[in-house]
Amino acid sequence: MAITSSKPQTTRHAVRGIVTRADAQLVIIDTPGLSKPRSLLQERLNDLVRDTYATVDVVAVCLPADQMVGPGDKYLIAELATLTERPKLVALATKADKVSPDRIRRHLLRIAALQDQLGITWEHIVPCSALSGAQVDEVADTLISLLPAGPKYYPAGELTDEPEAVLVAELIREAALELVRDELPHSITVEIVELGVHDDTNAKRPILQVHANLIVERDSQKHIMIGKGGERIKQIGTAARHAIAALLGTPTRLDLRVKVVKEWQRDPKALRKLGFDTD
Ligand SMILES: Nc1nc2c(ncn2[C@@H]2O[C@H](COP(=O)(O)OP(=O)(O)OP(=O)(O)O)[C@@H](O)[C@H]2O)c(=O)[nH]1
Ligand SMILES: [Mg+2]
């Protein structure tokens, strides 16, 4: 349900994914990371993360096996330890497919050592890989074993409660992130101008019509996004259109334009308009 990319700060919303099984329903919330606020956007994201921590039963901290446990990870875990209503903590040693069993073992030991260093307790430490699927079921079992009994919040078959417009905007951003480099990813956001289903008499099935703006912060970035002869924006549009059609199961027509909203990450009004209001 949540988009992924090789660029930092990919997740900017608290996206819910719902897993319904015979014995339980697991609502997984993907949040942004907690980081040093360098913009109003980052402050808003940190507020969102803290609000989410306060409302969940368990926090699973992802610590990729191919990277050292860094100062950012330690900061985040130490923050979790200061919460008054402390959620239970699980460590996930992710990307297990990328390293040798020996390296995994050492990674697990370092994760275990964080308990004494930071004054926390891991209920479980689970190595896993989203790519190969190894131990993904164990992750679900582990999380479910830590949940209190409660109502089933969503009907079976529901995979997320994200509005369609948000999913579509995120898929467009995912396509854009894959096709840019360096600092630009931070500056990109997507605004849906119009989203509707059209019954085209010539088409056999209804068509999803999307009109969206790919927003950047500066004129120079606009030129990069458009690319030579419009090449890059065309590539982004094609990739996004396929992804949207695949997720929603509807043939899609996408009208995508690049727009500059000067310094939107620092502008309270722009942030509100672009859906980053935490109130
Ligand atoms: N090899 C491998 N790569 C993975 C695995 N899980 C995620 N990745 C890759 O790691 C990169 C980062 O994944 P994200 O899901 O965007 O990471 P994140 O922790 O949510 O990061 P932010 O949203 O930016 O805070 C992407 O390129 C993924 O394809 C895995 O299990 N194995
Ligand atoms: Mg993410």
Image (cartoon, rainbow, N blue to C red):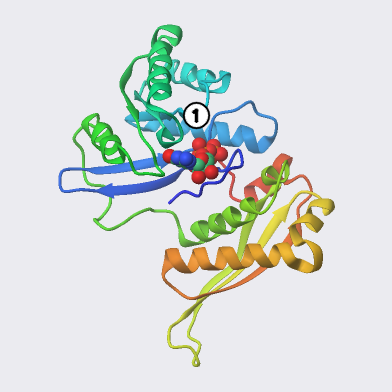
- Locate residue 221, reporting x and y percent: 79, 52
Q: Mark 1 points at which residue?
A: 66
Element class at badge 1: loop
- Locate residue 108, reporting x and y percent: 38, 20
Left or right position of 156 against 29: left
Task: Report the number of discs.
Answer: 1
Can residue 279 be seen here? no
Choose top left, top right, bottom left or bottom right for residue 113. Answer: top left
Amino acid identity at mark 1: Asp
Residue drawn at (32%, 30%) of the image = 57
Asked if disc 1 is less than 8 Å from ligand 1, the answer is: yes
Position of the C terminus by quadrant: top right
Choose top left, top right, bottom left or bottom right for residue 59. Answer: top left
Residue drawn at (60%, 68%) of the image = 238
Q: Nearer the viewer, residue 30 or 83?
A: 30
Furthest-left residue in this view: 23
